[in-house]
Image (cartoon, rainbow, N blue to C red):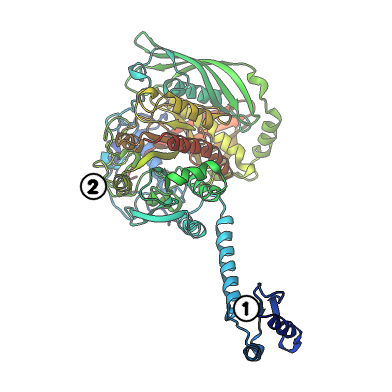
Amino acid sequence: MPGPLPSCSHTFTAVFSFSSSISQTNQSMALRILLALVVLVGVDGSPTGTMAPEMGSAYMPTDSNCIPEMANETYQIPFQGSEGDAEDAMATGDLNPNHYPAQRAAKVVQHYLNTRHGSPFRLFGLHSVENGSAENVNDTGRKYQLGLTVHEIISNTTLNCTAEVIFPDGAEQQPPVVQVSCEDLSKSNATAEEEAFYQQYKSNQSLVSAQNLPDSYGHIDPDKKPFWHLGIVASSFVMLNESNENTLYNMAQVANITQLATENEQLKFDSHILLHDMVSQEILHWKLLFTWSPAEGVEVQDMEQLRRCNH
Amino acid sequence: VNVQTEKHIHILKELETKEEWELDFWLHPVSMELPIDIHVPYSSLASVKEYLHQHDILFSVMINNLQELLDEEKAEMSENETRERGTRSFNFGAYHRLETIYSWMDTLVAQYPNLVTKQEIGRSYENRPMYVLKFSTGGNKRPAIWMDTGIHSREWVSQATGVWTANKIATDYGKDASLTSLLKTMDIYMLLLANPDGYAYTHSNDRMWRKTRSRNVGSTCRGVDPNRNWDAGFAGPGASRNPCSESYHGPSAHSEVEVKNVVNLIKSHGNFKSFISVHAYSQLLMYPYGYSYLSISGYDDVSVLLHYYFGNKHSLSSVFSDQASGGSIDWSYNLGIKYSYAFELRDTGRYGFILPANQIIPTATETWLALKHIMEYVRDHPY
């Protein structure tokens, strides 16, 4: 087990040089960096995938010391053509439902469904893509039409859905726009469990906190599973926002989820979550402040990517 | 004792009655044609010898010290038992540290010495030995099948599947007709920990570590993506030139000693017919290049493979080529190893890299069906 985390020797000047526009917060740049530093110092150095800077090394973060933020300048988008030249990232017309363009768009639908309908006892996973097509929309973006099935994981039911995903054009990341319609969406209804869970944690007798969901061995304590699910739902907001035709996100792990005092009848949580992008293979660290109740679902109050240097 | 006359039989029968000598006749005196074996306690040895001499009965000592023999046998049996307990008690449904896997490999070799040998193919960046298990029934550089697991260290179900599969091959040999026939004419090489430094690091520091642990000049970031480091379209699309990136291709092709060790082995052997790399996650079977599958080994191979691998277990049955440049199976295919495949094991994102241990054996079992089919196909289509 590694020892206590040494403090990062970031300087404000160096950090300011990042061209980051990914944070959704309204806080000033300085405050955001301060927050990032605080979090980095406070993070547990155990094998969870949270990064520990090289012990004892003093360094000045430069581009070659920092994780690229989906940086196009250093990472070339993989060309995953398979049926000759016809298939590339700009494929138009009918898509092979098993190939990556349709699959990536379908994954976005999963994230969307989880933001809208996910809960500690309700979680959607992409099951399969049945059919898909894509077209350019004027000069504003790319539109995908999909027939897919999703799996409600906890009740183990499968639903047929049709969806439309529009990826906006532009140099900067913008969230895709999703419309989806699934048969029997209310079929998987976990009201009783949700209410019981809500009541159990609503009173502020002792605030719950959990780390490493799952742990390195894939294990989650049964009573902590709902928090893992909450982490997935909350991170779906980020994954949805950050998705484009060159990403494929899954949540890798909840490094930390800590309950805060209940606010306006909503359970409130602070969390540190690891996301995995299959395309770049990067692990992205995000801090998420969110609330949940059976009535309101998950609402994210603050989300912020934790930039990591010296990885 | 060998008797010559009827009289001798008579005399020996008398010997049987001499209770004070406590003789134990293993083969009784019956007739002149059959030998007679007598177990003589040490205390009576001199007297018995004297007796036989007196009557001109020829004898020879078969076992000088029975107890010694028994002791030896007992020791051997208990050793075998421990060894067997070693491999039998190894929990294949759990994730193990590097040291545990390495010592298990030794118990496997000890238990199946006529089939399995361990070969060091070189060392890692941090000087850990890299071991290959060779399954062979003889011959000299027979056509061989290569399989590596764990080249990306965080994909733990890959290494775990490798361990299970190595054990499966050893235990099924001699019992499974197809596997036994395969090993009559072909060898199987397995590199269970293709990235030992990375694997150790996932246990000690960072469960999400993917790359090697080599130091990069001009950067405080360490490691190269070992599956972007092969000499096949090196530094092309799908790889990064930033040392801090998870898909950093490295300063040059084969710069990583872990990759070079494999390259050297495959090239110097010269007779590999199949090259299989095992990764996680996504539940896919991948084959080289971005071309249609018609351009490699033919449609039939792949479609049958799909049928086996995706038969009924997987909801996501996709196959597409992995055009991340500098990959191992692209390199092996270019070298002429026609049957080059990469597996992506469970799952499809729910647990991702941190797959629960109780899914190891189901994963390994279903993958074995596909692996076996590939190997049988290679056996039946020599080139």
Query: The residue marked by circle 1 belongs to what chain?
Result: B
- Of residue A298 and residue A278, the one placed in the foreground of this image is A278
- Of residue B181 and residue A251, the one placed in the foreground of this image is B181
B252 left or right of B5 in image = left
Residue A309 figure quarter: top left
Q: Earlier in the sequence, mark 1 or mark 2?
A: 1
Q: Position of residue A257 (x, y in %)?
A: 54, 41
Q: Nearer the viewer, mark 1 or mark 2?
A: 1
Q: Amino acid at mark 1?
A: Asn
Q: Residue at x 71, y 75 (%)?
A: B28
Query: The residue marked by circle 2 belongs to what chain?
Result: B
Q: Which residue is mark 1?
A: B2
Q: Amino acid at mark 2?
A: Val
Q: Position of residue A193 (x, y in %)?
A: 69, 33
B295 left or right of B371 in image = left
Q: Residues within 10 Å of mark 1 (few under 14, many from 20)?
A: some
Q: Which residue is mark 2?
A: B217
